[in-house]
Image: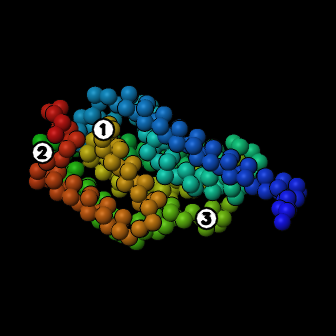
């Protein structure tokens, strides 16, 4: 029997769909590349700056710039599927829209970093040396990790994580067209992500915000929470790990690999 060739019209009809898939895959690859560049920059910029728990944050401008790059490195891989979904849903053919969405997402994290800087500056102003490791700093760090563990299993965390893991409903329910709409939707998605991950970021400050080791650990926890299918298992495992680290900080900090003490010695 002779094989019947597929109609030319049918083949051409499939071409735009395949082209759209290739564009989205290219977008995800570009986001991962930006994240990789963020890691390279962070490793270089923070070399020798890890002073352990409650590391100094430097000037506002320097911290905010560093923080945004850190968030790009840590968060873009886990939010890349959401940005690709937005690119699939958007009615505009502009290739800039997904990047505006990503910019809005990072803008939400920039606002969170600004708030964290303000809280840190106020705490140092009011408490002074009370935050030092040999005084209350170690205890506050351990309690912060324990509080982050508790937050992992709260209803608020569950709601925010649900929006991060299945963003389709949130995107369709708050859809805005145009460039400004892309930024606004990115900010909204970023706000859900801040609600999901703020306790993990507080843990990063408690362990050493200038530590690439702890930065990588927190980024890994964020990724597995958002991307792995076993939602409940991952959430409880994350809570258990944070609680364990908090207890070690309080009882045996020398048992924590990668922890830098104020003396400058890495455990």
Residue that mark 3 sits on? 168
Q: Residues within 10 Å of mark 2 (few under 14, many from 20)?
A: some
Q: Quadrant location of the C terminus?
A: top left
Q: Residues within 10 Å of mark 1 (few under 14, many from 20)?
A: many
Q: Nearer the viewer, residue 26 or 174?
A: 26
Residue that mark 1 sits on? 211
User: Is residue 160 toward the left or the right of residue 3 in the image?
Assistant: left
Give how far across and how far down residue 97 sits, in percent: 68, 46
Look at 29% across and 30% down and name the residue there: 49
Whether residues under marks 2 and 3 lie with C-beta atoms below 8 angstroms apart, the answer is: no
Residue that mark 2 sits on? 254
- Secondary-structure class at tag 1: loop
Look at 33% across and 38% down and name the residue there: 212
- Where 261 sits versus 193, above or below? above
- Secondary-structure class at tag 2: helix
Give how far across and how far down residue 120 sits, in percent: 32, 43
- Secondary-structure class at tag 3: helix
Dot 3 or dot 1: first in sequence order is 3
Instruction: Give the Cα distance between marks 1 and 2.
Output: 16 Å
Q: Residues within 10 Å of mark 3 (few under 14, many from 20)?
A: some
Instruction: Give the Cα distance between marks 3 and 1.
Output: 34 Å
Residue 59 figure quarter: top left
Look at 32% across and 28% down and name the residue there: 47
Give how far across and how far down residue 224 sits, in percent: 41, 57
Q: Quadrant location of the N terminus?
A: bottom right
Dot 1 or dot 2: first in sequence order is 1
**Residue 236 visible in the shown view:** yes
- Where 87 sits versus 264, above or below? below
């Amino acid at each position: 029997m002779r094989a019947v060739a597929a109609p030319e019209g049918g083949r051409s009809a499939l071409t735009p769909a395949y082209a759209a898939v290739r564009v989205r895959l290219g977008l995800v690859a570009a986001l991962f590349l930006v994240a990789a560049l963020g890691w390279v920059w962070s490793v270089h910029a923070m070399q020798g700056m890890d002073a352990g728990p409650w590391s100094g944050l430097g000037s506002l401008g320097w911290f905010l710039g560093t923080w945004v790059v850190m968030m790009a490195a840590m968060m873009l891989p886990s939010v890349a599927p959401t940005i690709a979904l937005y690119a699939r849903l958007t009615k505009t053919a502009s290739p800039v829209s997904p990047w505006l969405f990503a910019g809005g997402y990072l803008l939400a994290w920039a606002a969170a970093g600004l708030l964290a800087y303000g809280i840190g500056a106020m705490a140092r102003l009011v408490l002074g040396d009370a935050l030092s490791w040999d005084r209350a700093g170690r205890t506050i760090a351990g309690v912060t990790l324990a509080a982050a563990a508790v937050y992992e299993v709260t209803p608020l965390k569950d709601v925010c994580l649900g929006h991060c893991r299945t963003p389709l409903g949130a995107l369709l329910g708050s859809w805005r067209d145009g460039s400004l709409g892309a930024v606004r939707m990115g900010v909204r998605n970023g706000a859900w992500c801040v609600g999901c991950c703020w306790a993990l970021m507080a843990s990063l400050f408690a362990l050493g915000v200038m530590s690439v080791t702890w930065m990588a650990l927190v980024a890994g926890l964020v990724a597995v929470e958002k991307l792995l299918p076993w939602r409940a298992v991952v959430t409880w495992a994350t809570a258990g790990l944070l609680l364990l680290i908090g207890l070690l900080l309080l009882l045996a900090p020398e048992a924590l690999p990668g922890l830098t003490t104020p003396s400058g010695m890495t455990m």
